[in-house]
Amino acid sequence: MLTIDSKSTVKSHIDGGTFRVLAFAETRNRWGVAVTEWTTYRGAVVFQIHRVSDEGQMLRQGTFNTEAEARAAANRLYRRDK
């Protein structure tokens, strides 16, 4: 399952917003699943799930309004790849 990463640092994004990794789990195929909290440059907060390559490349798989929705979708994605 996804691990909680409460010590994650806030990182800047090229579009002017910021993001923080809330949870990450590595899958068997060496890709991982991550839940992130994004604050847009306008101040809106959204939660996204990503596939993360072993090189650190993040590919967005969905955007959600709540952390609970994002974690549920990430768990489904993780179980599918497990």
Image (cartoon, grey):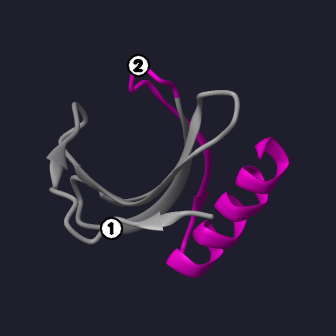
Residue type, label 2: Glu
Residue appearing at x 84%, y 48% in the figure: 80
Can residue 57 be seen in the rendering of this structure? yes
Magenta segment: 53-82
Amino acid bearing label 1: Ala
Quarter of the rendering occupied by the N terminus? bottom right
In percent of width and height, residue 72 lies at 69, 72
| Residue 56 as seen in the image, left or right of residue 17 | right
**Residue 43 found in image quarter:** bottom left
Residue that numbered label 1 is attached to: 44
Foreground of the two, 72 or 54: 54
Residue 71 included in the magenta stretch of the image: yes
Q: Using residue 15 as the reference point, say whether residue 68 is left or right of it.
A: right
Quadrant of residue 27 in the image? top right
Q: Is residue 26 left or right of residue 23?
A: right
Q: Could you say where residue 52 lies in the image, as x and y percent from the top left?
A: 51, 34
Residue 7, image quadrant: bottom left
Mark with earlier residue (2, 1): 1
- Residue 12's place in the image compared with 53, above or below, is below
The numbered dot on residue 31 is none
Residue 66 in view:
no
Question: Which residue is at a point 78% across and 42% down the rendered structure image?
Answer: 81
**Mark 2 closeness class: few <14, some 14–19, many ≥20 residues within 10 Å:** few
Q: Which residue is mark 2?
A: 55
List x then y, in percent, for residue 74.
65, 59
**Disc 2 + disc 1, Cβ < 8 Å:** no
**Under tag 2, what secondary structure?**
loop
| Pointer 1 local density, CA inside 10 Å: few below 14, some 14–19, many at least 20 | few
Is 65 inside the magenta-drawn segment? yes
CA gap, disc 2 and disc 1: 29 Å
Q: Is residue 18 above or below residue 73?
A: above
